[in-house]
Structure formats: structure tokens, C-alpha cells
Amino acid sequence: MKKIRLLLIEDNRLLREGITSLIKKHDDIRVVAALGANENILQKMRSFKPNVMLLDLGLRSQNSLQLVKAAKIDSPPTKVIVMDLIPLQADILEFVRAGVSGFILKDATIDDFLRTIRSVAQGTKVLPSLMTGSLFSQIVEHAVNGARGTSSKLMESVRMTKRERQVIDLISDGMTNKEIAQKLHLSPYTVKSHVHNILEKLALHTRVQIANYAHASESFQDIANNISLMAE
């Protein structure tokens, strides 16, 4: 059985050693190197030729996104998995477009880590579980597959009222339901109803996710602006 050659990049030494120790117990994955951000990562990639790089999204001394872009140019066969505690939707889209094949939350179980590594090594794209089933995950999936022209068609299936669009914008500005009600001359109950409808239509779960949706990257915002609007 051919082993998966894994390169681990993680700032936190304790986490780095812990992940390495857990993965080493499994015969089908070999950790070829476990590095901090201060080392010459691209040089190590050329030396070890890993199948998969497991990368901390928030490296202190390096820009993780730029590192991914450089790695995909320098070592195209190496697939990249990004680790983070709670990745922002805008970050996910940026990293996907840079060439990342998977995401894993740092509080995931070891089984989830192993499943993600094995799936990505076999060519599967893996999104964070918190995004599974959301409209955003569908947009990212199309970005992964290069189907840029179909994202707007996905969005067209979401019928959003002008008032709901206003509420999204005000949530992104950090306003509470009471503040939104005062600004739009609505009752707090009506605003709460709009927020509920927005969450349902976008398959999201929290106001924070709505704000992340509104504050997403410019390219994603261009897609969002194409949401089909209907009269209230």
C-alpha cells in the first residue's frame, strides 16, 4: 500500500507535535515533516515532495494565502488542506480560488482529520462541516470546479425581497434587531421575522454568518448582488 506523504505546517508546537503523534499511528499516512512558519516551507516541499500539505490558516510570520499560491506554482501535485478554528466564508472562497483542496476545523476529531487527509489525497474536495448544505457551500463548490458561470444561476433560485436585502446590509453593519427596526420604521417582531426568513433562504444558522455573507470577498459580493429581488 502506497503511503500518503504529509507535510504539516503549524505555528503551535504542542498542536504540531500532537497531530504528528496521532497521525503516525496510522500505517497509510507518513508525516514527512512537521514545520513551524519560520522555516523555508517551499524548499521543504521540493525536498520531501508531499502528496498533501496540512496548513495552519493563521500563520504568524507568513501569509498563509500567499504561501498556498506559491506552493501551487512551485509544487502543483501537492494538495493543500487548510486548518482553522472557525474560518470566515470570505477566507474559504479566497483559499479555494488559490487552489486549496480541503478545510478542517482544529477542534475536529482525529477521525475527521484522517478522513479529510485521505479524501483530499484521492482527489476529493472537502469543505468544513459547518458549511455543508449551505448556499455558500454550493457557490464554493462551483468555484472549486471552475464553473464560474453557474454561480449566478444558483443565486437566481433564491428569491429575496428588497426589505430582506436591506436587513442583510444593516446586520453586516453590526446593528441589532431593535436598531434595524428603528432605522426602517418597523416593529422588532417584523425585523426578527425578516432575519428568520433570510437564514432559511440562505441555509445559514446565525446572524454572524449573515454578516460574513455580506462582508465576503468582492467577487462573492458581485455574485450576491445578482440575487433575484422581488417585491415585498
Image: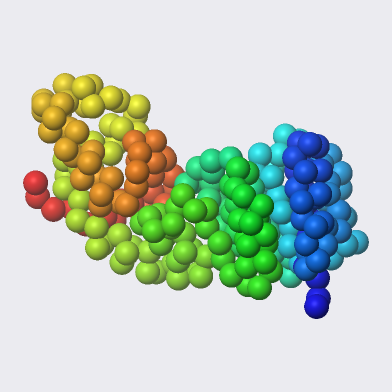
Q: Nearer the viewer, residue 99 or 16?
A: 16
Image: 188 above or below 36 = above
- Work out which residue is located at the far right of the displayed protein and give it: 47
Quarter residue 112 falls in: bottom right
Q: Is residue 141 visible?
A: yes
Provide residue 192's location: percent of width, then percent of height: 19, 33
Q: Is residue 120 visible?
A: no
Image: 206 above or below 116 = above
Q: Which residue occupies 34% across, 47% down?
A: 204
Quarter residue 124 falls in: bottom right
Residue 183 horizontal side relative to residue 92, left or right: left
Residue 213 horizontal side relative to residue 197, left or right: right
Residue 145 horizontal side relative to residue 64, left or right: left
Q: How is the image coloured?
A: rainbow
Provide residue 153's location: percent of width, then percent of height: 31, 66
Q: Nearer the viewer, residue 74 or 83?
A: 83
Q: Which residue occupies 81% across, 43% down?
A: 17
Q: Which image quadrant: the N terminus?
A: bottom right
Provide residue 151's location: percent of width, then percent of height: 38, 64
Provide residue 108's location: percent of width, then percent of height: 60, 48
Q: Which residue occupies 52% across, 57% down?
A: 127
Quarter residue 148 falls in: bottom left
Total tally of numbered discs in the picture: 0
- Work out which residue is located at the far bottom of the displayed protein and give it: 1
